[in-house]
Image (tube, helix red, strand yellow):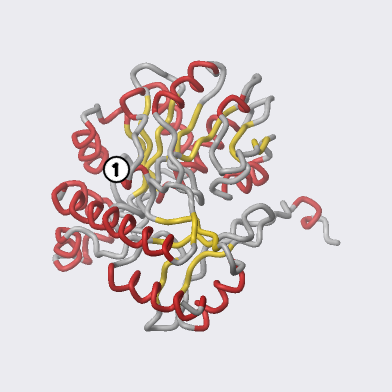
Amino acid sequence: MSDWEKYVKKLTPYVPGEQPRKKDVIKLNTNENPYPPAPGVQRILEDLDAGSLKKYPDPTVHDLRCALASYHGISEDRVFVGVGSDDVLAMSFITFFGDAKKSVAFADVTYSFYDVWCRLFGIEYERIPVREDFSIDLNAFDGDRGGIVIANPNAPSGIALSPGEIAGLISAHPECVVIVDEAYVDFGGESMLPYIDEFENLLVVRTFSKSRALAGSRIGYAMGSKKIISYLLAARDSFNSYTMDTITQRIGIASVEDDEYFKKRVSDIVKTREVYGKKLKDMGFSFPKSAANFLFATHEKMDAAGIYEELLNRGIYVRYFKTPGIDNRLRITIGTDDEMERLCIALKDILGI
């Protein structure tokens, strides 16, 4: 082994859902929004002046931060923007957990990138077992912590905690930063944003990838106290000041400005989730009550792996995890009514209904 290989971090990376190259498939495996982004986004792309790309983007992302601050009713200095929420979360792990002498805690069934970042950045961590019904037991997070991360609603279960429950957790842990990952909150969860005045150690993280249909553009942001955001900005500027390109900044602003379209599309997805959730139950599927844009389903008679393979043969992609404890469940993203109807037809065929 060469000298440099001795110092390479050998990691088991996060594995995202498959992005099929084939056309004419139904893609319900990565929790993307089935609808296009706000019409103003298309206008930005149509009016794009390529000459503007010869200059660096605004390193402070001022206009987008101001748009987000105005939308949420807070000041700009309480908003941090990154290239997708993964970028925001990774920077947060480095900033707040990198030198922690105690373990960072998160659920053992949750977004699987958390432990990847901990291993990458050399952060000690503990995965807290969820209950049998996949709900998170916040009492199990007791003890002195180097940090806490809660996905709310959680993934892949879709289960949401109440703000009061999470506030109790934060109150019990003034010694560390508590990150609440709200990637799916718009589909039925309640945000912790109203609590950022009460808790200086609370960081609320959001994404444009799900409810705002901009997974391909990569916009994430965090909100918190002025102090906590100032630390994030200092860390980012020590790493890379020019993180978000000019086009993405303008696209983000266009999305935030069209609140009517945003709420309409979120409402459409929630209605579809409820309608087709009932149809799946009628076919023998069960799943936790979801406050997200997906269902975490298991079937009473057929194993998840078999259903997954049969759907794949029919050009329908859902997410199957081989991880012990969740290896008999499928995470099914909510698509359009037409996509969900075609899914149900395929499932009836597979199950012999």
| Residue in front for this viewpoint, 211 or 310 | 310
Q: Is residue 256 above or below residue 139?
A: below
Which quadrant is the N terminus positioned in? bottom right
At x 15%, y 58%, the residue is 40
What is the x, y in percent for residue 304? 59, 66
Q: Secondary structure at mark 1?
A: loop
What is the x, y in percent for residue 2? 83, 61
Judge from the rendering whether residue 222 lies leftward or rightward of residue 98; answer left or right: left
Judge from the rendering whether residue 30 lies leftward or rightward of residue 262; answer left or right: right
Judge from the rendering whether residue 117 lies leftward or rightward of residue 87; answer left or right: right
Which residue is label 1 attached to?
61
**Number of disc labels:** 1
What is the x, y in percent for residue 273? 33, 57
Q: Residue furthest right?
A: 1
| Residue in front for this viewpoint, 37 or 228 | 37
Q: Is residue 15 above or below residue 65?
A: below
At x 50%, y 77%, the residue is 311
Residue type at mark 1 is Val
